[in-house]
Amino acid sequence: MAVPHLIRRGVSGGSPLHPLRGLLFASQEFGQRSLSSETGDAAAQLKGAREEVKQLLKATSCHPILVRLGWHDSGTYDKNITEWPKCGGANGSLRFEIELKHGANAGLVNALKLIQPIKDKYSGVTYADLFQLSSATAIEEAGGPKIPMVYGRVDVAAPEQCPPEGRLPAAGPPSPAEHLREVFYRMGLNDKEIVALSGAHTLGRARPERSGWGKPETKYTKNGPGAPGGQSWTSQWLKFDNSYFKDVKERRDEDLLVLPTDAVLFEDSSFKFYAEKYAVDQDAFFSDYAEAHAKLSNLGAKFDPPKGFSLN
Ligand code: HEM
């Protein structure tokens, strides 16, 4: 879909928090650009950033941690809170130290460090957009489906606007199915989306020194790529496919990780319906994953322009 043309607004229109706002003022004063060129600039910057993310992925194999970064920014969303940014969600708040220090975010400071140079180069791209762009690009570059993304997310301005700790799911709660539903239903997501999104664990590893989960190393992780160590859910943990569902179902190897919240996808009857389907039908998984990932990436986001815009 092409970048939409914007309706001309007054100079004071839109959010004061969008970093392109300053550029807009300057161009309007000289009368050389229309507001639609502002969106054009934003799209051009996002495309430039996307190319740099691809280079970064090639150089460092950081696909998994970029996916986790995007998810942990958006996954704080609470649909019961109508006020932005109190509702949490994809608003760039995860760049602030206070939120990076939440227990669930252990290690994600490394992801921020990796993409900060891209943010510095493309300063018109918000953190909220950059986190989601990086995550979707990582999925696609790892062989996953094309995610129907929308951009134009506005950033929160200050650490005081970060969500409280404790909104992300725990991996070993007493009743995993109940816990997953409590957390994901609060985000407005359903059982199908819980199972599809859990399939993101086809990528990456858990590290005892970060989350407390996983082995220090396995035969699949001892040589990297990237920093060696940790325990992966799948043997080819940089390839996005449906092997997560096959491996969790079969428990074929002690070296592969199954968290209590992964195991329950084959125990709870409603979750199981989808997990069994995805284990045998990668196309169904890709299609449901792409839709759920796009929805996740939009949770709690305030867009400027209000409906956002897509990149081609
Ligand atoms: C269903 C509830 C979920 C739980 C309980 C959970 C838990 C975890 C835990 C404990 C880790 C290990 C972190 C570490 O030690 O560094 C992890 C990693 C990861 N999670 Fe999840 N997760 C969940 C859902 C998701 C979702 C919805 C996504 C994305 C859509 C996701 C993407 C990832 C990725 C890609 C990694 C690997 C990170 C890396 O290798 O650095 N997870 N998750």
Image: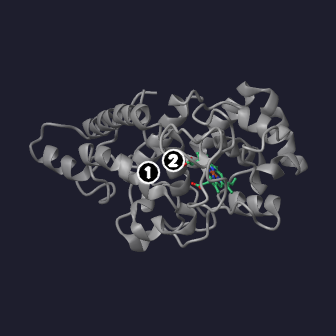
Residue found 62% across the figure and 32% down from its top:
240
Check disc 1 and give the amino acid type. Ala
Q: Give the structural element (helix, strand or loop) at label 2.
A: helix
Q: Residue at x 30, y 55 (%)?
A: 13
Disc nearer the start of the sequence (2/1): 2
Around disc 2, counting alpha carbons within 10 Å, would you say few (fewer than 14), some (14 to 19), or many (20 or more)? Answer: many
**Residue type indicated by callout 2:** Ile
Residue 191, compared with residue 43, is above or below; it is below
Image quadrant where one finds the C terminus? top left
Image coords of residue 96 (percent x, y): 39, 65
Q: Mark number for residue 284?
A: none
| Residue located beneath label 1 in the image | 111
The Cα–Cα distance between marks 2 and 1, rounded to whole angstroms, is 6 Å
Residue 276 x %, y %: 85, 36
Asked whether the viewer can see residue 300, the reply is no
Q: Residue at x 46, y 27 (%)?
A: 1
Q: Is residue 64 above or below residue 239?
A: below
User: Is 61 in front, or is 50?
Assistant: 61
- Judging by the rendered image, the residue that carries numbered circle 2 is 65
Asked if the residue under mark 1 is in contact with the one under mark 2, i.e. CB atoms within 8 Å, the reply is yes
Viewer-proximal residue, 268 or 309? 268
* Crowd around label 1: few <14 · some 14–19 · many ≥20 (10 Å): many
- In the image, the residue with mark 2 has its CB under 8 Å from the nearest atom of ligand 1: yes
Locate residue 246 relative to residue 310 in the image: left or right: right
Q: Is mark 1 within 8 Å of ligand 1?
A: yes
Residue at (79% x, 34% y) in the render: 246
Q: Which quarter of the picture shows residue 182?
A: bottom right
Secondary structure type for disc 1: helix
Give the residue furthest to the left. 30
